[in-house]
Image (cartoon, grey):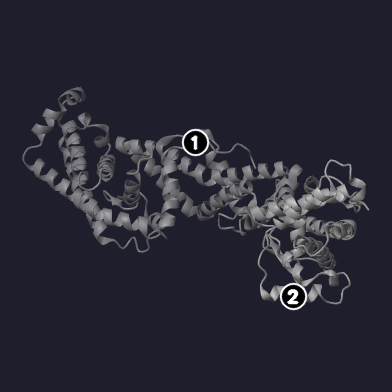
Amino acid sequence: SAFRSLAGTKMSACEQFQGLLCAFRGLVLLPLDSAETEKQMEVFLGGDCLAQLVSSGAIAYGGVDCDSEAGQEACRQFLLCVEETADLLKLECSCRNYRNEFSINYQQIFSSQTRCYRPAVLRGALSLTEGSSFYVNGEKFIFSASILNLGTELHCAWLILADLLRRCSDGGYGQSQILNNELPHGLLLLDAAWAGFEAAYITQLMQIEHGARMPLMNAIAATKPSIVSLEQYSAAMLTISQLNKLANFEGKGRSDLQAKTLMCAHSWLMKHGMTGNRATGSFYRGAKAMLQLVAGNVCDSFCKLQSYLQTLEGCIMEVDPCLANNDKLASYLMRLEECWDIGDKYLLNDVNLKCFLRLASKLEIFRQTSGALAEMVTNCEAALFLVLPRLVWLSTTSCGGRRILQGEMQATILEGLLPHAQDAPQLRAAFSKASDLLSSWLQAVRLSADLKKLPACLARGTTKALTEAFVQAIVAGPGGGGRCARAVAEAHLAAASAPHRAVHMARQASMAETALAGADAVILDEIEGAFEAMLRELESWSMRLQRHSAKDWNSMSSLLVKSMQGVSTLPYQQDL
């Protein structure tokens, strides 16, 4: 007997057997419903010779918990005791040469030619039934019939060993009879069935994993740095779209990402964003910042994803075949999809993009006009997000008889954010009244003064003074905006009244008091009241603009704030 030859070893056979029984009692069993129990009884108590060795009392051990942390640890400890018992008995181990064909990942799990039982393999055998399937990256996989048969054999061998240990644990068998006869046979039977199932099961899992990683491998192959033609970029975006559909679990998972968006972004940057000699003037500074945000980010997100994919080429086996489980890959795809959403909206429509470039330029002028607005932008204050929709309305509404953004530009800015926005007669009337009052008064001041002594803003006309008054009023908001507009008007009146600019700077307060007599005071009161009325009306439309399509407004406002913060360098340097 194998056990009789071990009397002088460090651990006796009886001690090892008691440890095996203890670990067996520690297994966590899951309850089997009546239908599942009946199905297993039908299989294992049927006509198969091996299955007939399984008693009905052992069926419950087909529901061993190999998934929970406690159940998996208990199963691991029991399987380790099984290995140690087989080694102590010096039982022959079934050949494991098939492991040489395993991938590097599985060779690390099954690191030697020893038994190396793993709970995951047991779980596979116990859970497989006819028609068993599972999904990876949304694709359904079904195990072959041969694997089902091998799984059934391992299931049988497992229940035979469990039945033996169960009866011994209950005192139904003499320990010596089990030690000398049945246990070695049960362990050999389990090992042979285990090796057969493990070889076929892991081989098919590797095939499934290879297929699951194929979208990633296709994307790696299609995004080589050597791609140059439109066809190559189209092929690259096709593979990226498929990868994004499977791996971008936090985003939309879009599968329609176009190469056209990337080509348009690159074209716009080559024409406008990458030539320093055009980066002059306030108009271009605001437009350039917006161009970098829209077109630059599209190119940047593609280049960074392309670079990351190339780093995966030599370590593809380290990537989880369930692509959505790879957080870093998902983050690159998430950013690319967000940039494509914005790029599709603006880059593919020249009118849309020109409109937003002009809007960004106007916001840059507003920022330079108001120190309070500039401070809000620099510190990204919460108040900025109340002021911003007012400034958008200012940019798309008549001001002094001129539209800062004309006709179709106004419709484009507000389209989708607030349908029928142009049907706002009360708001337009309020803007016009405030604008006409201030414009007429400034023009009267201009005509009554010596042009040589006027400040430059009035000497060239009233548009800049109007812009300053509206921006200062809008930044201050209702309750204080009217006074701000009045202060702008008073400052210009004082400047026009001073005989010399140096005297104006020294005597501004007293000259303003002298000038603000009679009719001027009445008109300034009217201007202040008109601006306050305009701001109250504007506030309701500002709220509507933010709330009607909040998601679209948040997306647009984020771009506008970033453009006002002044992006000075392109976010990517690699040429496509």
The numbered disc on residue 157 is: none
Check if mark 1's residue and mark 2's residue have beta carbons within 8 Å. no
- Residue neighbourhood size for the residue with mark 2, other residues' Cα within 10 Å, grouped as few (<14), some (14–19), many (≥20): few
In the image: residue 481, left or right of residue 32: left
Q: At numbered mark 1, what does the secondary structure look like: helix, strand or loop?
A: helix
- Of 54 and 122, the residue lying toward us: 54
Q: Is residue 170 above or below residue 8?
A: below
Which mark's residue is nearer the viewer, 1 or 2?
A: 2
Instruction: First in sequence, mark 1 or 2: give its number.
Output: 2
Task: Identify residue type, mark 2.
Answer: Lys
- Of 363 and 118, the residue lying toward us: 118
Q: At numbered mark 2, what does the secondary structure look like: helix, strand or loop?
A: helix
Q: Residue at x 26, y 48 (%)?
A: 400
Whole-percent x, y for residue 78 in the image: 75, 53
Task: Identify residue type, mark 1.
Answer: Arg
Q: Residue at x 53, y 40 (%)?
A: 273
Residue at mark 1 to residue at mark 2: CA–CA distance:
78 Å
Location of the C terminus by quadrant is top right
Whole-percent x, y for residue 358 in the image: 42, 46
The residue wearing badge 2 is 39
Q: Residue at x 20, y 35 (%)?
A: 492
Can residue 243 be spotted in the picture? no
Q: Is residue 3 above or below residue 186?
A: above
- Of 439 and 528, the residue lying toward us: 528
Whole-percent x, y for residue 86 in the image: 86, 51
In the image: residue 396, left or right of residue 306: left
Q: Is residue 545 above or below residue 54?
A: above
Can residue 394 be spotted in the picture? yes
Whole-percent x, y for residue 389 in the image: 34, 50
Residue furthest to the left: 518
The residue wearing badge 1 is 278
In the image: residue 227, left or right of residue 354: right
